[in-house]
Image (cartoon, rainbow, N blue to C red):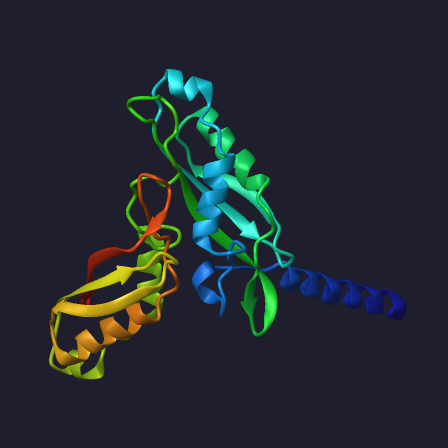
Amino acid sequence: MRKLMILALMGIAMFINSAKAQKIYDFVSVEKQPSYPGGIAKFYEYLGKEIKYPEAAINNKTQGKVFVSFIVEKNGKLSDVTVTKGLSTETDAEALRVLKNSPNWNPGILNGKPVRVKYNINVNFNLSPTTGKMTAIKSGIQPEYPGGTSKLYSYLAKNLKYPAQAKKDKVEGKVFLAFNVDQDGTLSDVQVIKGLSKETDAEALRVMKSAPRWNPAIDANGHPVRVKYQMAINFTMT
């Protein structure tokens, strides 16, 4: 009986260790985010070369975005590639095909070790009005936080700290910011263009200067470009 209990306890310990090993981290909760070799611009180049606009989608004039999520494993492989918001059967299948064939990424790092990280991205299908062919992935699209607006709000909710003085003075409202999203997705020249208070302005600047790299804007030729971006950060005590 004692041996059985020891074996059972060993089994539980092994299960717990296995569960820990399989933990999936959110993109913003790791020290170093996973990345495609060479950066996001190289990833868009890969998509631009590999994606083939499905014939049925061309005939049906299907255009728009396929939203995809996947896990970047510890060894950089992409797993659990899933469409989270589709466009059409054909475009969804093509987005999945290309991402499943993607070269290994650089894994996310936490406490100096590679970890499994969930990643979200969208693949854009645009038809040229003259040729009926896909002009470029991410063609003419604006920069965005990795995973989209909801992930940006999640990042702000986790990292924004309401300044004590602002709370004491019952300061509420919006801080309007402007910044550049550079070709590699880094944010530069972060400025307050319309402030709320000294403390809230400083906190808004701090959080955005610490933000992970964004997905950069892509021009009509499929090249990442530097873009000026404006947004508001809301401070409310309710």
Q: Quadrant of the N terminus?
A: bottom right
Is residue 218 toward the left or the right of residue 105 in the image? left
Vertical position of residue 149 compared to residue 5: above or below = above
Residue at the spot x=48%, y=28% of the render?
52
Q: 124 or 9, which lies in front?
A: 124
Residue at the spot x=41%, y=21% of the render?
57
Would you say residue 160 is visible in this rendering? no
Residue 72 x/y as whole percent: 56, 53
Residue at the spot x=11%, y=71% of the render?
195
The answer to which quarter of the image holds residue 232 is bottom left
Residue 229 x/y as whole percent: 22, 57
Q: 117 or 125, which lies in front?
A: 125
The answer to which quarter of the image holds residue 140 is top left
Vertical position of residue 192 compared to residue 127: above or below = below
The answer to which quarter of the image holds residue 227 is bottom left
Q: 203 or 185, which lies in front?
A: 185
Is residue 196 toward the left or the right of residue 32 in the image? left
Q: 30 or 131, which lies in front?
A: 131
Would you say residue 5 is visible in this rendering? yes
